[in-house]
Image (tube, rainbow, N blue to C red):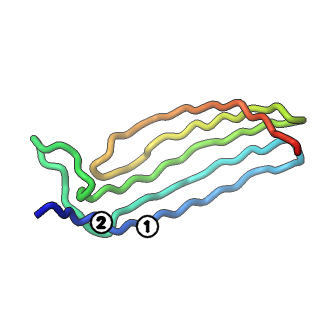
Amino acid sequence: SNLMAVPNATEAGFRVGYLKSHLQVESFMEQFSCLSGDDIRRNDMPAVSNKMAFRNVGLFFKYQPKNLGFNLRVSQTISGQNIGQTRSLSAGVLYQLNY
């Protein structure tokens, strides 16, 4: 068959932080979990039918006093199934267009 069953998934997040007109600081926890699927075996390549689950914790920071600003996000995977334990860092530059 040319069809592959993709598992249904759930995703949830919890954030707590500080928000002011030009400053945003948050800590967060995110969780993702497939409701079905199969495990990746030793010699298999990952596929969309695999059961994956993970939990991340991290920090988010955004500063935008005028039209130009920047953001920074750091997160760590603390548990998971069929996923590596990853530390990620992302940064961005923001520019707000006013019409």
Amino acid, disc 1: Thr
Viewer-proximal residue, 37 or 48? 48
x, y percent for residue 75: 53, 40
The residue drawn where x is 19% and y is 60% is: 38
In the rendered view of the protein, which quadrant contains the C terminus? top right
Disc 2 marks which residue? 7
Residue count near mark 2 (Cα–Cα under 10 Å), binned few <14, some 14–19, many ≥20: some
x, y percent for residue 91: 63, 31
The image quadrant of residue 89 is top right
Q: SS class of the residue under badge 2?
A: loop
Viewer-proximal residue, 92 or 84? 92
Identify the mark at residue 47; answer none if there is no mark.
none
Q: Tell me: 37 left or right of 21.
A: left
Disc 1 marks which residue? 10
Residue count near mark 1 (Cα–Cα under 10 Å), binned few <14, some 14–19, many ≥20: few
Q: Nearer the viewer, mark 1 or mark 2?
A: 2
In the rendered view of the protein, which quadrant contains the N terminus? bottom left
Q: Is residue 22 positioned above or below 18 on the image? A: above
Q: SS class of the residue under badge 1?
A: strand
CB under 8 Å between callouts 1 and 2? no
